[in-house]
Amino acid sequence: SSGINAEYGTDVLTLTETHRPGTGVVVLENGSLFINSGRVDGIRRQGVGVVLSRRVKNSLISYSPVSERVMWFRLHSRQVNVSVVVAYAPTEDAEDAVKSDFYNQVAGVMDELPR
């Protein structure tokens, strides 16, 4: 088979620095599902996302594009549902407000995820 499974040997691939503005869901040519969480101002910087293979894309329960640095998604499995947070932290030399916003977003997501 081609695509994400053959190239990376995985069914779930999380991404940072996608450089795609806005949020969206796209079915790729190989049948995989790409979910993007990017900047709302149209600038092509930062961005996080996930690619789910054809095999697992129907296991997607929900997802939330929080910001250009944080998103989460939830997958159903036979034993237990799995929540995954995709986070792209600012560098140490970023402004304190940017770092604070990021860590507050991550903390908010962690508080709200189903247990």
Image (spheres, rainbow, N blue to C red):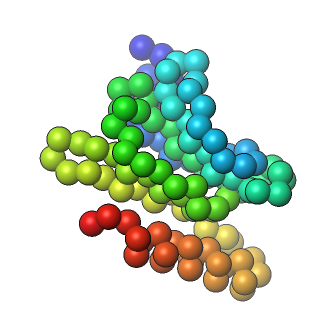
Residue at 33% across, 37% down = 59
Of 45 and 7, the residue lying toward us: 45
Q: Residue pushed farthest left?
A: 79
Q: From this view, report whether residue 110 is shown above or below residue 42.
A: below
Q: Seen in the image, is 15 located left or right of residue 38?
A: left
Q: Quadrant of the N terminus?
A: top left
Residue at 48% across, 56% down = 72
Residue at 59% across, 37% down = 25
Q: Quadrant of the C terminus?
A: bottom left
Can residue 114 be seen? yes
Q: From this view, report whether residue 30 is shown above or below residue 66.
A: above
User: Where is residue 46 shown, x and y percent of the image?
Assistant: 71, 56
User: Where is residue 75 shown, x and y percent of the image?
Assistant: 34, 46
Q: Quadrant of residue 35?
A: top right
User: Where is residue 91 shown, x and y percent of the image?
Assistant: 68, 72
Q: Residue pushed farthest bottom?
A: 96
Q: Seen in the image, is 40 located left or right of residue 109?
A: right
Q: How many marks?
A: 0
Q: Seen in the image, is 92 located left or right of residue 73?
A: right
Q: Residue pushed farthest top?
A: 1
User: Where is residue 6 shown, x and y percent of the image?
Assistant: 44, 22
Residue at 28% across, 44% down = 76
Can residue 10 be seen? no
